[in-house]
Amino acid sequence: MTAPSPGREADPAATATRDWWGTEDVCVRYGDKLALEHVTFRAMPGRVSAVVGGDGAGRTTLLRCLAGALAVTSGHVRLPPPLRIGYLSAGSGTYPDLSVNENLAFRATAYQLPAAVARERSAEFLERAGLSDARDRLAGRLSGGMRQKLGVIASMLHRPDLLVLDEPTTGIDPVSRADLWWLIAQAAANGAAVVFATSYLDEAERAVSVLALDDGRELASGTPEEIIAAMPGMLWASDARPEGEARRRAWRRGGRWRIWEPPGPPSAPITDLRHENQDEPDMIMTQIREEPDELWKAGRPVAPDLQDAVTVAILARELAGAEAESVELEGGGSR
């Protein structure tokens, strides 16, 4: 069940001793659909955490639990008081018929922030995010990137203890994305535990910790470096897609093919690739990614990044599930 800290006052001192916010063994069910299955996630004050996963992975469900907007079916959610939470949904969270200033003034009132403090913080954030000249413009007339920046500013204006952002950078231009990252970093610098969902794994690498979800279950968690280091097996790059069984473990990236070799004896296509490169030592984890011309030659081992590690985790789960199903079918047929 959801268990926010007692009290509803916007009192930072009341929550200053909390060392984390998040979930413990949480399950969320929508009818017959289990949207989250025993998910544990902790967000630390002053740090940025990322939640990644594909469509239907459970990212938005988890973030709604963290925002106090959704009750869990089982498990525990540890949250600050409601007035100490900032939340940006998958939309911009702004009112199109209000101006930029009016949107921020309304949000400040809702969070019981003194008007003078709200004006001072609004001016600072708008100036840094490049929205000062648009302060009197209706939010409905802003560009997509400007609306997203306004939404993030509105959600962090009261300096929450927990800031929850659902895909704040999706579909916006690089300049606006840089401004948004300044705002996110500023919120963490002010002491907030920042949680953001993203489909961009290169962005997730900026976070201190990452939770990857797949079909409502934890796929991988830890720092980006820990997730990468935990990737089993080896990773190869080739100009051609492999044939046979290895084809199921290959995906296109950067115009070439990544091939994952699970732990154990190498498959025939990988053995062939190694045979063509006998002078190359098996030092996948020590290869230097800053040498793309050397790494992208056919059959060369490559050092994985976070995108590779998450992809491998998905493949490993799919292959394990297929093998378990095959064993079950064989067992049923022998009876």
Image (tube, rainbow, N blue to C red):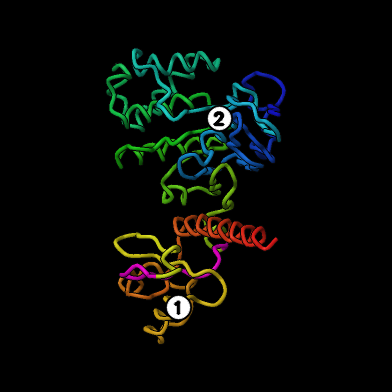
Does 17 sit above or below residue 284? Answer: above
Secondary structure found at label 2: helix
* Place of residue 151 in the rendered image (x, y in percent of width and height, measured from the top left): 41, 26
In this view, the residue in front, 313 or 91, is 313
Does 272 sit above or below residue 111? Answer: below
Q: Quadrant of residue 61?
A: top right
* Residue matched to label 2: 64
Q: Which mark is residue 154?
A: none
* Residue matched to label 1: 268
| Three-letter amino acid code at the position of disc 2 | Arg
* Place of residue 206 in the rendered image (x, y in percent of width and height, measured from the top left): 46, 49
**128 left or right, relative to 233:** left
Secondary structure found at label 1: helix
Q: Residue 235: say if magenta.
A: yes
In this view, the residue in front, 22 or 270, is 270
Q: Quadrant of residue 16?
A: top right
* Place of residue 297 in the rendered image (x, y in percent of width and height, measured from the top left): 32, 74
* Place of residue 235 in the rendered image (x, y in percent of width and height, measured from the top left): 45, 68
The residue drawn where x is 46% and y is 52% is 205
Magenta segment boundaries in residue numbering: 230-243
The residue drawn where x is 60% and y is 26% is 70
